[in-house]
Image (tube, coloured by chain):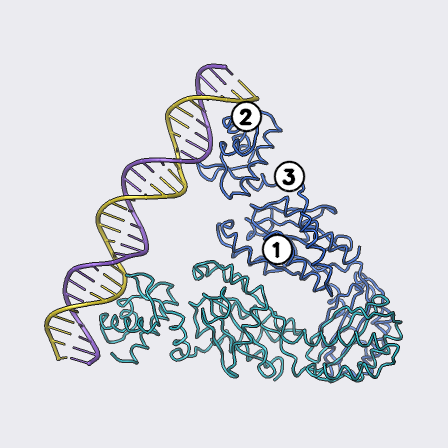
Chain colours: A blue, B cyan, C purple, D yellow
Amino acid sequence: MSEPRKLEVLRAIVEDYVHSREPVGSKALVERHHLGVSSATIRNDMAALEDEGLITAPHTSAGRIPTDKGYRLFVDQISAVKPLSQAERRAIQTLLEGSEDLDDVLERTVRLLSQLTNQVAVVQYPHLSRAMVRHIEFVLLAPRQVLTVLIADTGKVEQRVIDVGQELSDEALAGLRSRFLKSLSGTPLSLLPQALPAVVASCEPARRHAAQALARGLDALASSTREERMVMAGTANLARSNVDFPLSIGPVLEALEEQVVMLRLLSEMAQDPRGVTVSIGRENPYDGLAEASVVATGYGPGSSAKVGVLGPTRMDYPTTMAAVRAVARYLSRILGP
Amino acid sequence: MSEPRKLEVLRAIVEDYVHSREPVGSKALVERHHLGVSSATIRNDMAALEDEGLITAPHTSAGRIPTDKGYRLFVDQISAVKPLSQAERRAIQTLLEGSEDLDDVLERTVRLLSQLTNQVAVVQYPHLSRAMVRHIEFVLLAPRQVLTVLIADTGKVEQRVIDVGQELSDEALAGLRSRFLKSLSGTPLSLLPQALPAVVASCEPARRHAAQALARGLDALASSTREERMVMAGTANLARSNVDFPLSIGPVLEALEEQVVMLRLLSEMAQDPRGVTVSIGRENPYDGLAEASVVATGYGPGSSAKVGVLGPTRMDYPTTMAAVRAVARYLSRILGP
DNA sequence: CGTTAGCACTCGTCATGTCTAAGTGCTAAC
DNA sequence: GTTAGCACTTAGACATGACGAGTGCTAACG
């Protein structure tokens, strides 16, 4: 019983099952792939694969389907990267190049990726670890209510209304603004927490309280932009493959809606700095995704933000991985290194 | 055969069907509602209702279920408004009052509404017909790239990167900014298109070109905020009631994702200035929503923006309508008249 | 004329049983 | 290590029949 052939058998099972959605038997296997041996031999190999927990039979007399572990082995060792078609490459390029601001780029990205893969696409807002403060704006909405706007040099804008706890005049606020701006302009967002106390300390005692509140607000804005938001598209694709989620797509939709879950998942994946990472079925930390797989990779500055695709474990991994990787590359190119 | 009783029968059918999800027969009807007549009489009434197209029988020997037309009559004439429980009122109040900015308010609103109704909730961003320019900011990203930020007094912030077509210094840009700001501060967004040309004309000829580009950008920002965005929550609720969508929830998810579809639908509904509007099944202009109903109402300034709920035609209309109305009221109160 | 009782009729549903095709595991031979 | 052959298991398709829910109709009643 040769090891290489066993892997070949596993690969054939995965490919056929992904293609047909049906358990694949030994006979069908020798017909569709010229493996050079008989079905009986394949049966022996399959029994071995089952012992190793790589495939399983839904019932006594059905074909086999891959387990999570089987998919894992397939992804890690067997599958070859499938290059995108010329048309697909062009589609990515033309679609992403006409975009205006960051929101728009991300919006288009997920739409594109979900169409490309027929699955759900998600993209996380870029981390701002290297982003710097470009501008700060305070706008007086009411005597104590200040709209605080933080603009990063990546083009990202975050705003929030803050209660400063004391009445401020327009002039006082303008003074605070120029003081904050002068000290903080160019500061990396990641260093903001350390930089803020000094600015507050430099303010006149009478306005210390307000300055403190504003500083807290800015801190929150900087960290809230860090990795807390995401965009997605293609949830309708879940319904079409509703055969693939025996239970129901409910839990999956819940996970997607609870952005926290997805964001944590994305950030826990992809330790691998270069290349696409895959999280398969029960490997996912969230129970609702026990029958789903996530294919993701980093993009942008330091590859710290993630873009990815979510679909059933029975997924065409090579193609999906190729699409995710290609999109991430174009995305990085557009947003700068 | 008395007309009032016939309506009573229709009402009983709708209520029982909504409650049990199963076709309701004449016998069950006389048992659960004390109508004072026998099942044979009810049968006659039901036959009449069927002739009028208000109810229908899935097959020869099953009970009846309401048609779209039946639901319509129920909503328009029969149903009584069901007041929310004290606990629900309190939940609305406490949940919505702690919110920070507009995004946050809307986000909380849809979450709340979807939990309250166990359905999908959507809310449209408020129109800015009465909103005014609070602040304008230009930030130089590159010699020709300007990040343009428009802040409305509602707290809404919109931004976009604009190519001004000529190189600008920081000082020149600051000059443009103060000129724009001085002329436009306090201008209603709806009047921006008329007001912009004058500002451009007042600029020095050397900067006319850039000013023109910036004006176009501001115009686009103002109109893009008008009614083009929406927030939703509770899509997972669709999956739970997947019995209610015989075909599949796919088309419904598609409609929700194609925000354009929902936005047009929302704006076409609710001509009725006060009160909740309902669009039932095939009344919806979009085919994918043939088995869905939308319950919506206006809120905020002039009740021009919409908030609503989407669910299966087999929906508890009185309760849903009450929830939508209550939420819209609190929303209006928070955002001002 | 509206209401009622009774009854024949229609169908969907469920339980039961049978048959077939697919696929396996095992053994013995190569 | 590979193969052929065979006994065995089982899901799924199909037919059958009992059952029950529910209707429509007719004739009688007040």
For marks 1 and 2, give the CA distance. 40 Å
Q: Between disc 2 and disc 3, whose residue precedes? A: 2
Q: Residues within 10 Å of mark 3 (few under 14, many from 20)?
A: some
Q: Nearer the viewer, residue A274 or B192?
A: B192
Discs 2 and 3 share one subunit: yes
Q: Circle 1 marks a residue in which chain?
A: A
2 or 3: mark nearer the eye: 2
Decide: marks 3, 1 in contact (CB < 8 A)? no
Image disc number at residue A115: 1
Q: Which mark is residue A79?
A: 3
Give, as a three-letter code, the residue at label 1. Answer: Gln
Earlier-in-chain disc, 1 versus 2: 2
- Give x and y (percent) for residue B145: 82, 67
Looking at numbered disc 2 in the image, what kind of residue is underneath it? Val
Q: What residue sits right under mark 2 in the picture?
A: A37
To which quarter of the image does residue A121 belong?
bottom right
x and y percent of residue A157 in the render? Answer: 75, 68
Mark 3 vs mark 1: in front: 1
Q: Residue B221 or B337: which is nearer the viewer?
A: B221
